[in-house]
Structures are given as C-alpha cells and as structure tokens.
Image (spheres, helix red, strand yellow):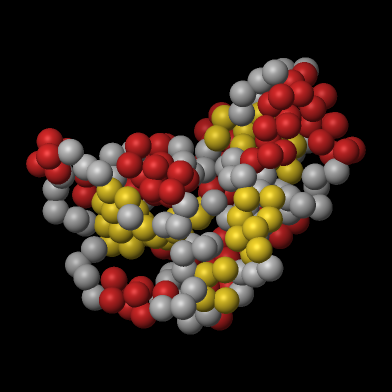
C-alpha cells in the first residue's frame, strides 16, 4: 500500500522493470499470456528493462532462450545480477573465487581470478560440493569478503521448486560468522543501477515480478511501485 504523501510525490510513469524467470518464463517455457502482455506494454509510452537474478547462464544465453520463446526483447534491455556483480568486482578491483555455473562465466570474461581476494556465490549446483565450499570457507576465514550475487532461497523449475544460492550463502555466513554483501535483488543498488541505465528515477518507475520479497519488496525499498 502506498501512502497519500508518497503518491503525491510520484511522477508520471516513464519506465517498467520486469522480472524474467517465473514472470515471463519458467526454464524453456513461456508463462501463459506473457508474450501478449509484453506486446501491450510495448504499445505504452514507457521504457522497459528486464531485470533478473538468474545466474545459471550468461546474459547472451538468456537472451537466446527468450528469443526462442518469441519474446520481443533486445539483449541491451536485459540487466542481470551477474552484470551487477561484475560491476562491483571492477569498481573494487576484486579477484574472485567464482562459485557460478560454467555457462555464466562468459559474463566475467577478463576478470582476474588468480589468488582470489573475495568469494562470489551465484546459483551453481555443480560447484556446491564440500571441496569447493570448504575452499570458500577458508578464504573467508582469512579475511576475504563474501559476495552473494543474490540470496534467493529457491527458484521455480518445471518439476517444482529447487534450492537457490541463498541456503549456501547462509551456510558460509554461519560457518565464518560473517555477513555477505548482496548485489542482486532485493538490494536497492540493483534497482537503482537498472534505472540509471535507462535514465529514470525510482519515482517514475514500476516493478512487475513474481517474488514478493525480492521483486516487489526490493523495488518498493528503492522508491518504486511494485505489483
């Protein structure tokens, strides 16, 4: 619910941020009615940005998946938590131990991973084994910061809900008595970065998503409306 004061402070709608996984598609299937809804949005005088915490594949692969599903989306319109994570690594000159799937590594091309100075965790089922997690654990104990690309507890697959990276990040936090820095949704900075890329303020934007905490709550915390 939005207070009258906040409503009065809002400006004309200029942009809509749209979640992808669970909102427009689930794996290789479009959510029923999603293509038609997007076509109607394209007719509105607003900028669109597609924002996602998906970390199991690079942005180019995600774009190809959406193209096969016949969504009218350009690759430049997609803003992922992998992009947000890369921005942090470059800004802070961090050499990461990357716990991400091989299919996501393309978005970190050129990033130095020798002698890691931080641990970066995304959705990486093949990496979540004792050996790799213990390596991350020891690095954090030695002072390396823990960076979570996001902390989703679960995500939707065709056959049901599956564990997200959140439980593994939380395990490392518990084991090392430290707190992870989160760069994806629901962090305020994620939404502000996405809006900055289209030259829009939070008061002029709306978020559409399927996750009450990460999509809607995060957007509202950043000053946007969320539905």
Which residue is nearer to you in this view: 153 or 129? 153
Task: Where is residue 185? Give x, y as percent.
Answer: 48, 44
Q: Say whether residue 38 is left or right of residue 143.
A: left
Based on the displayed image, in which of its 4 quarters is residue 28 positioned?
bottom right
Which residue is nearer to you in this view: 157 or 190? 157
Quarter of the picture holding the N terminus? top left
Query: What residue is shown at x 42% (from left), y 37% (from top)?
Result: 189
Measured along the vertical axis of the image, is residue 57 above or below residue 205? below
Query: What residue is shown at x 67% (from left), y 44% (from top)?
Result: 165
Query: What residue is shown at x 19% (from left), y 67% (from top)?
Result: 45
Which residue of the protein is positioned furthest toward the left in this rendering?
8
Q: Residue 172: in sight, yes or no?
A: yes
Q: Say whether residue 106 is left or right of residue 81.
A: right
Q: Residue 95: in sight, yes or no?
A: no
Q: Say whether residue 8 is left or right of residue 144.
A: left
Task: Where is residue 175? Give x, y as percent.
Answer: 76, 23
Q: How many marks?
A: 0
Task: Where is residue 122? Give x, y as percent.
Answer: 66, 45
Query: What residue is shown at x 28% (from left), y 39% (from top)?
Result: 223
Measured along the vertical axis of the image, is residue 132 above or below residue 29? above
Quarter of the picture holding the C terminus? bottom left
Based on the displayed image, in which of its 4 quarters is residue 94 positioned?
top right
Task: Where is residue 178? Give x, y as percent.
Answer: 66, 20
Based on the displayed image, in which of its 4 quarters is residue 160 positioned?
bottom right
Q: Say whether residue 113 is left or right of residue 201.
A: right
Measured along the vertical axis of the image, is residue 204 above or below residue 90? below
């Amino acid at each position: 619910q939005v207070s009258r004061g906040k409503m009065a402070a809002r400006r004309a709608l200029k942009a809509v941020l749209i979640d992808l996984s669970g909102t427009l598609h689930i794996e290789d299937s479009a959510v029923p009615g999603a293509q038609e809804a997007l076509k109607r949005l394209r007719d509105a005088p607003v900028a669109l940005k597609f924002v996602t915490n998906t970390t199991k594949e690079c942005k180019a692969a995600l774009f190809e998946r959406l193209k096969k599903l016949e969504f009218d989306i350009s690759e430049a319109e997609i803003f992922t938590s992998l992009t947000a994570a890369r921005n942090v690594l470059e800004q802070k000159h961090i050499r990461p131990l990357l716990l991400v799937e091989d299919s996501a590594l393309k978005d970190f091309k050129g990033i130095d991973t020798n002698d890691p100075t931080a641990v970066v965790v995304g959705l990486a089922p093949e990496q979540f084994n004792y050996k790799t997690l213990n390596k991350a654990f020891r690095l954090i104990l030695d002072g390396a910061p823990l960076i979570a690309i996001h902390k989703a507890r679960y995500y939707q697959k065709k056959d049901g809900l599956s564990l997200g990276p959140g439980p593994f990040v939380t395990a490392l936090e518990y084991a090392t008595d430290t707190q992870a820095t989160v760069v994806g949704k629901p962090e305020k900075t994620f939404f502000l970065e996405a809006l900055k890329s289209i030259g829009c303020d939070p008061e002029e934007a709306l978020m559409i998503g399927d996750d009450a905490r990460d999509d809607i709550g995060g957007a509202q915390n950043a000053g946007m409306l969320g539905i």
